[in-house]
Image: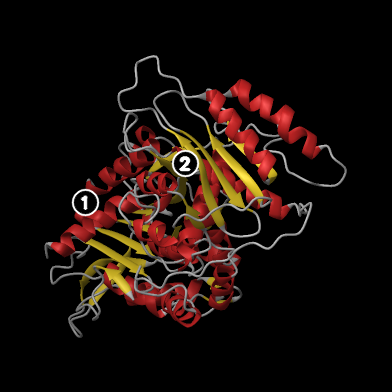
Amino acid sequence: MIWGTLPEERPKHTLAPYVFQWCRMFLRHEGKPWEFTPGQKHFLRWWYAIDDDGRFIWDEGVSAGPKGVGKTPFAAAYCWAEFLAPVRFDRWCPETGRPLAKPVGDKALVQIAAVSREQSQNTMKQLRSMLPREAADYFGIDVTSSKVSYKDKTKSAEIYTVTASGKSQEGHEPSAILFDEIHHWHLPEAKEVYETMSGNAQKTKRDNKCRPLSTSNAHQIGLDSVMETLYDKVAKAKRESKPLSVLYAVRQAPEEVDLSDPEQLLAGLREAYEDAPWAPVEDHAKAYMEGRITTERLRRFHLSQVVDGGDAWIRPAWVKRATLNDRQLLAGSRIALGFDGAENNDAVALVACEIDSDICHEVAVWTRPEKAKDDYEHPFGEIDAEVRRCFEEYEVQAFFADAYKCEAMVAKWSEDLMAPIIHRKGKRAVRASGTCAVAYNMGALSYNFMKTAELVVDAFARRTIRISGSLLQAHCLNAVRLLKQARGRPAMVFPGKRTKFSPKKVDAAHALILAWEARQKVIEQGVKPRGVMTASTYEWTTDND
């Protein structure tokens, strides 16, 4: 299905046939003449649609879809057409009444804008591969790794990439702009590039009207990317039935697809990839069913869906259906512990995750009393005793502890409790990090923590995690999605409090994530139990989601 503003019927007048014919004649892809897919042709018919005065109908365009539908080759073919093909209205044919087109000519200035040099080079690499040498010689152009220009230097027409600051692009007069993968365009400098270049496009004259065209995958809600801004604008216009000059087309699967049903999952993937028959939809379905693709990633990148559960970290219905009432952790159970330390305003939480099942238990949560004095401190003696009790009653095979405000105590746990187990003959436990058996630095390991948080959300979605404990449930429900930037990584979701001093605590949710990561490490490293025990099992409820 197509979501957006793309009409189903064909336009009355369009210049698109000139683009199709030119690309088929001069471009090659995998050794064959270039041919747009049926869906790409329908989009381009409307993108090059004109009114009875020969003016373009749309001022801006977005072509989006799942990964692997050929957005990069499409973008490269489009750039070549804008540079050399007849893409501007010339006059009406007196015999047929159809529009005649002409190339932009020496005024052609095609900009390929991306958030990184590596990203822009993907399109430039595709550009170079699509124009055969004989075609380049015919048009008299040079094609390098960074730009396309005429050998005759009296002609100023170019195709080139843009990754610089917005200010450096001020005043340029492009004839065409391609914004590549705008779901990545969320940082201030990237949005400045977009605003500056879009402003330049608005200044161009009618006979060489520049209209920005963007490619994208589904955006991540809350990142405030250019794609999200355009999506919100289109959604608002559709709700209010107002006209919009943005041609916005997202090819996606229906939102009601039941991902737990293999047949529905495959049908949804086939619908999303309807315009890309080469896509390995069976492989995508298999990867999801085997847990190699998270639910969020499947929906965004393969079903091309924007899924919004508000700003909750986990959908409340998922948390509630995963909650077990008063389930006891059996003595001798193999467990992984997660501990979130805190100063006096936040809670301190200890969570145990069974290695041999998917049940995570609230061991204890220490919260500042409502009427506590200013000098209140958490009962660290009691906290220490509870941790040591866990080592006495259960077989602890991993213990990941955020040591914030508890550094000395965590170091002592590492020395007294975990180090003796790790150093025994045979693998009996795993370390939290290379430098400490227990301490987990959530600053240095923030990327790992947020990746695990993503896996925890996916486990709730797949019904492969269960939790026991009223405060653990409450903290999971309290957590909201905050965006944080790990060093050298894209922004990711961090489960946090809505405001710094919010009374709704989330520390047990953090301890849950640490325990889950610890459990995963135990399983991955093949740590064996000291004895043999049978884990209890419970059936899922069949309530509505």
Residue 224: percent from left, percent from top = 33, 45
Label 1: few (<14), some (14–19) or many (≥20) C-alpha neighbours in 10 Å = few
Query: Which residue is at 23% across, 81% downward?
Result: 9
- Measured along the vertical axis of the image, is residue 478 above or below residue 441? below
240 and 82: which one is in front? 240
Q: How many callouts does the rendering have?
A: 2
545 and 249: which one is in front? 545
Circle nearer the viewer, 2 or 1: 2
310 and 318: which one is in front? 318
Q: Secondary structure at mark 1?
A: loop
Disc 2 from disc 1: Cα separation: 59 Å
Pick out the residue farthest to the bottom.
95
Residue 350: percent from left, percent from top = 53, 39
Pick whichever of labels 2 and 1 is earlier in the sequence. 1
Disc 2 marks a residue whose amino acid type is Ala
Quarter of the view holding residue 102:
bottom left
Residue 448: percent from left, percent from top = 58, 43
Which quarter of the image is occupied by the N terminus?
bottom left
Quarter of the view holding residue 86:
bottom left
Tell me the residue that label 1 is attached to: 205
Q: Is residue 395 at least partly visible in the picture?
A: yes
Pick out the residue farthest to the top.
375
Query: Which residue is at 47% across, 54% downward?
Result: 326
375 and 65: which one is in front? 375
- Measured along the vertical axis of the image, is residue 361 above or below residue 431? below
Residue 371: mark in rendering: none
Label 2: few (<14), some (14–19) or many (≥20) C-alpha neighbours in 10 Å = many
Residue 292: percent from left, percent from top = 59, 63
Tell me the residue that label 2 is attached to: 508
Is residue 429 found left or right of 335 in the rendered image?
A: right
